[in-house]
Image (cartoon, rainbow, N blue to C red):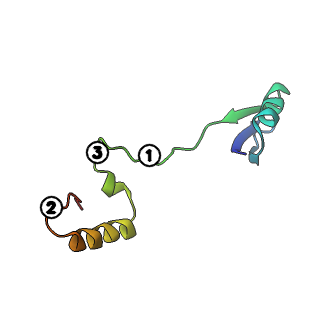
């Protein structure tokens, strides 16, 4: 089940709740809450430099693989 962020329309209190889609809909249908979309996902795109968006540990691993791969490898670090 996903986590949703809700704001109480009366008090302004913001809460995160782990619930099913049907439970989410029931809460919204009550009229007391509105859903807040506040998360910005960390998406890795192949349009840019995907390696720059990954952790240093992953880049270190790729360097080790490239070093051991020999000639003709296509790993770019």
Please identify, in this view, whether the residue under mark 2 or under mark 1 is nearer the observer.
2
Query: Alpha-carbon neighbours of circle 3 within 10 Å: few (<14), some, or many (≥20)?
Result: few
**Which residue is painted at 59% across and 41% down in the image?**
38
Alpha carbon distance from label 3 to label 1: 11 Å
Tell which circle, 2 or 1, labels the residue nearer the N-terminal end: 1
Alpha carbon distance from label 2 to label 3: 23 Å
Image coords of residue 66 (percent x, y): 23, 68
Instruction: Return the residue nearer the eye: 45 or 15.
Output: 45
Tell which circle, 3 or 1, labels the residue nearer the N-terminal end: 1
Alpha carbon distance from label 2 to label 1: 30 Å
Report which quarter residue 60 is drawn in.
bottom left
Report which quarter residue 36 is drawn in.
top right
Taking the image as drawn, is residue 10 in sight?
no
Tell which circle, 2 or 3, labels the residue nearer the N-terminal end: 3
Please identify, in this view, whether the residue under mark 2 or under mark 3 is nearer the observer.
2
Image coords of residue 39 (percent x, y): 57, 44
Q: Residue beneath label 2, please? A: 72
**Compared with residue 22, is residue 68 higher up or lower down, i.e. above or below?**
below
Count how many numbered circles sit on residues in the image.
3
User: What SS does tag 1 mark?
Assistant: loop
What's the mark number on residue 48?
A: 3
User: What SS does tag 2 mark?
Assistant: loop
What's the mark number on residue 43?
A: 1
**Which residue is painted at 13% across and 66% down in the image?**
71
């Amino acid at each position: 089940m996903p986590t949703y962020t809700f704001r109480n329309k009366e008090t302004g209190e913001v809460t995160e709740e782990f619930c099913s889609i049907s439970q989410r809909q029931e809460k919204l249908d009550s009229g007391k809450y509105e859903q807040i979309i506040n998360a910005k996902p960390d998406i890795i795109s192949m349009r840019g430099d995907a390696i720059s968006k990954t952790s240093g540990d992953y880049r270190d691993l790729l360097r080790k693989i490239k070093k051991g791969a020999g000639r003709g490898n296509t790993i770019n670090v």
